[in-house]
Image: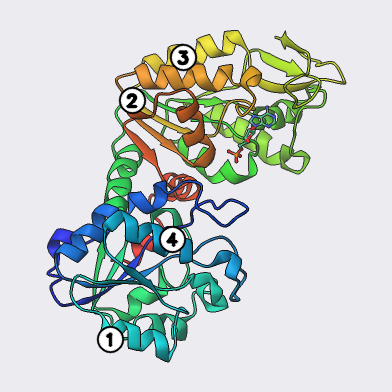
Amino acid sequence: MKRLEDIEFAGKTVFLRVDFNVPLDEKGEIRDDTRIRAALPTINHLLSQSAKLVIASHLGRPKGQFNPKFSLKPVAERLSQLIGKQVRLAPAVIGDEVERLKKDLNGGQALLLENVRFQAEETSNDASFAQKLAQGIDVFVNDAFGACHRAHASVVAIANYVKEKAAGYLLEKEIDYLSRAVRTPEKPYVAILGGAKVSDKIPVIESLINKADHILIGGAMAYTFFKAQGQDVGKSLVEEELKEQALAILKKAKESKVDFVLPLDHLLATAVDREAATEVASSFPFPADKMAVDIGPQTIEKYAGIVAAAKTIFWNGPLGVFEIDKFSQGTVKIAEAVAKSAALSIVGGGDSIAAVEKAGVSSKISHISTGGGASLEYLANGTLPGVEALG
Ligand code: AMP
């Protein structure tokens, strides 16, 4: 995989794929511009090298049609402010007008294409659409880590039609950190997995069983494992259809050397509601009208102890319903333990980022990955379609 430093950009037309999939409020204004800021080092480098920059991104799920709700207009405005230079927004993704705008670019100028998902061919990784995207392009730069697990035309197929290709700074940094966890994790390697669903995390759990020393499970997904073992978990969130797979994972974990840990105790509530009464349970059955909303105090202590001894930590998914303060202790305390440890710590994904922010410890994490799905898939497979495409 080439880096930006390996390529001479002066006067070349560069297609830069970024992840500007920012959250918008009801008025269509940007709520959080972290993703735009994350691409600035690459954009500023390319502009300072006098590249003619064509930037592409997706935003939301417009399902292959133009929809003003998903226009990149607010992004073009914010990007112009951030780089102190006018960034023109093209009226479409491909077509004569777009080609004219591309040709009109001078070195050091940037053009933002409209949302690539306004074309259905984007998500089907269509070859002739990719060829159109590549028209007049000398170099393809991918800095959209959060989209690299998708085989989409502006991420994967385009690479077949452009000679020079490189990773942007953000992608390079993501791969640098994640590959350390995949290839040469210093031991003990501790993975902390939480969140609502086991279904998203099966491939990563299977891969971690062979690599990690401890896998600490929290969040609602713990209760799919308990239910699969025949425990009565009351009203806790369970993925019934995954019980077989959960049992297979537990069996594999037992056969391998990994320490696969489920919560020892649980914070129960009558509902996901800040007013709900709570109690701690350390055994089953749970009362029929109660659900688990966080890990309990003994579990916090045990997990924090394992984290303290770790040399490598990967964390994805909150350990409880952390959005409600009363149910956020498990997540916050483990975030503090991760922050305190001297390990290489990697936290991935939207909710996990929000959790470390809530705990006020973001600056003490070695690497906060911008892509939840992409980081899980990288950990599971050791590569991503978008990374493979860069050669
Ligand atoms: P995910 O997208 O799978 O990482 O799930 C994140 C969501 O899981 C957050 O919104 C949490 O509130 C939720 N969550 C975590 N623990 C629980 C739990 N015990 N019961 C219900 N939801 C939970």
Farthest right residue in view:
288
Q: Which mark is residue 103?
A: 1
Instruction: Locate the N terminus and report the quarter of the image it occupies.
Output: bottom left
* Disc 1 packing (10 Å; few <14; some 14–19; many ≥20): few
Amino acid under disc 2: Lys
| Left or right of 199, for residue 237 | right
Residue 155 in percent (x, y) is at 41, 67
The first of marks 1 and 2 along the sequence is 1
Instruction: Residue under label 4, please give it.
Output: 75
Q: How far, Cα to Cα, is label 1 from label 2?
A: 45 Å
Residue 344 in percent (x, y) is at 31, 29
Q: How far, Cα to Cα, is label 4 from label 2?
A: 29 Å
Query: At numbered mark 2, what does the secondary structure look like: helix, strand or loop?
Result: helix
Amino acid under disc 3: Ala
Query: At numbered mark 3, what does the secondary structure look like: helix, strand or loop?
Result: helix
Q: How far, Cα to Cα, is label 4 from label 1?
A: 22 Å
Q: How far, Cα to Cα, is label 1 from label 3?
A: 57 Å
The first of marks 4 and 3 along the sequence is 4
Vertically, is 177 above or below 291? Answer: below
Q: How far, Cα to Cα, is label 4 from label 3?
A: 40 Å
Instruction: Locate the C terminus and report the quarter of the image it occupies.
Output: bottom left
Instruction: Residue under label 3, please give it.
Output: 304
* Disc 4 packing (10 Å; few <14; some 14–19; many ≥20): many
Q: Nearer the viewer, mark 4 or mark 2?
A: 4
Q: How far, Cα to Cα, is label 2 from label 3?
A: 16 Å
Q: In the image, what residue occupies the spot 56% across and 18% down? A: 330
Instruction: Residue under label 2, please give it.
Output: 364
The first of marks 2 and 3 along the sequence is 3
Vertically, is 235 above or below 101? Answer: above
